[in-house]
Image (cartoon, rainbow, N blue to C red):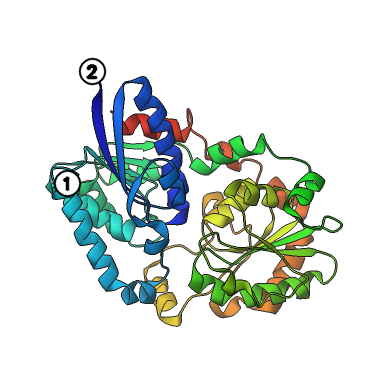
Amino acid sequence: MSTSRKILVVAGEVSGDRIAASVLRQAAVLAKAKDIELDLYGIGGEECKEAGVRRYFTAEQMQVVGFQEVAKKYRFFKSVFADMKWVLDDPETKPDVLFLVDYPGFNIRLAREAKKRGIRVVYYVSPQVWAWKAGRIKQIVETVDTMLVVFPFEVELYTKAGMKDVQFVGHPLVELLDDEEQGFTSRTEFADRMVIPADRPWLVLFPGSRKEEVERHLKIMVGAARAFGGSQYHTIVVKSPTLEDSLYTSLPPEIAQFRSSSKDTHELMHHAKFGILKSGTTTLEAGLANLPGVICYKTSIFTYQLARSMVKLKMIGLINIVLEKKLYPELIQTNMSVGNIAGALTDVSSRTDSFTKELRSLRSMLRSEGRPSDRVARILLQ
C-alpha cells in the first residue's frame, strides 16, 4: 500500500527555482521506487511547475531587489504570507515537510510559523549570514530542523551557533555544470545553433535577472564593452527569460541578444572570452565556467547605504568570497562606470592565463559526496 508525502516548497527567486526543481525531480524518482505518492505545492518558477509543483504564486511575482523595491510591494508580500499561513493551517494542505530554498526574508519567517505548528522544516541553500544580518542565524537555529548548506565553511558556522543537523551537500551548480558539459559542442557548432557570429571572440554581458538591475546596468555595460573591445569582440547581452523584451530595445543592432535555457547560457560562458557580470550567483557560474571578467553592481542610494551598514565583508562578488581573494575586479555604485569597467577588463585581459589558473580548484572545493539533488531529495523523504 502506497503512502503519501505532502511537501510545501518555497523557491521565491529564479535561481532557487532551478535548484528546487532539480531536487523535486529526483524526489519524484525516489518516491516512485518507494511507493510514496508525492504532493508538491507552493511557490516556484517555471522549472518547479514542470517538476510537478502546483503553484500558489510564481517566483517571478516574488522576485524583487533592494529594500525600497520590497517596501513598494509590502502589501503583496503581506498577503502572500497570510496565504501561506493558511496553507500551513488547512488540514487539506498542511505539509509533512516545508522545503525552503534560499529567499531568507520570507522563508525564515515562514519557518517560524511552521515550527509553531510542529511541521518539519528543511532549508536548502543557507542565507548568507556570514556576509550580513548575522543575527538571523539564531532565528534559523530555533526554527529549522535541517540546514543543508552549499559552502563547506558554513557547517562550522552553524555548528557553533547550536544547529543540531547541518550538512554540506555540495553546491548544486557543480552538479548542474557537470551534467550540462557532457552535451557541450564546439564553439562553431554552438554559434551556428544559437545564430551568433563566431568570427571574433565573445564578450558577454550579464546585466541581471530583475527589471531594476537591467535598467541600471545595461547602458553602462554596453558602453564599457564598446570602450574595451571596439571591433575586436562580438558583444552579447544575456537577457533574463523572466523579463520583457522592451527592456532591451535600446541595444544597438551590432550587439547580439541571447535568451535561452540555463544550459545554453552556461555553454555560452564556456566559449566566451570575457564577461561583465552582475554581482550574485552569476559570478560563481562564471568562475565554474572558467570565464574571466569584471563584477559590477548598482542599486538605489538608499538601498546601498542601508546594505553597506549591514554587510560585514570587504568583497561582494560570490566567487571572490569563495576564493577568499579579489580575483575578479569589483566596481560598485559610482565606481561602476564605462571607463572603470573598460580599464578593469584591460587589466584582466593582460593576465588571462594566471586568472583562469586560479579557478581550477573551484569545483573540488564545492563538491561533496554524491549528487546534491539526490542527497537533498533523500532527506526530504525521510
Q: Which residue is mark 2?
A: 1
Residue 18, percent from left and from top: 47, 47
Residue 381 is left or right of residue 189, and the answer is: left
Cα distance in 3D space between marks 1 and 2 = 30 Å
In the picture, the quarter occupied by the C terminus is top left
Q: Amino acid at mark 2?
A: Met
Residue 23 is left or right of residue 260, and the answer is: left
In the rendered image, the vertical position of residue 274 relative to residue 171, given as above or below: below
Residue 152, percent from left and from top: 45, 41
Q: Residue 195 or 372: which is nearer the viewer?
A: 195
Using a 10 Å C-alpha cutoff, classify the residue at mark 1 as few (fewer than 14 neighbours), some (14 to 19) or many (20 or more). Answer: some
Tell me the element at label 2.
Answer: loop
Q: Is residue 134 visible?
A: no
Tell me the element at label 1.
Answer: helix
Q: Amino acid at mark 1?
A: Lys
Residue 42, percent from left and from top: 30, 49
Identify which residue is drawn at 42% across, 72% down. 308
Residue 299, percent from left and from top: 48, 75
Residues under numbered marks 1 and 2 in contact, where contact means CB atoms less than 8 Å apart: no
Identify which residue is drawn at 25% across, 32% down. 5
Identify which residue is drawn at 47% across, 37% down. 170
Q: Which mark is residue 115?
A: 1
In the rendered image, the vertical position of residue 286 relative to residue 313, given as above or below: above
Q: Is residue 210 visible?
A: yes
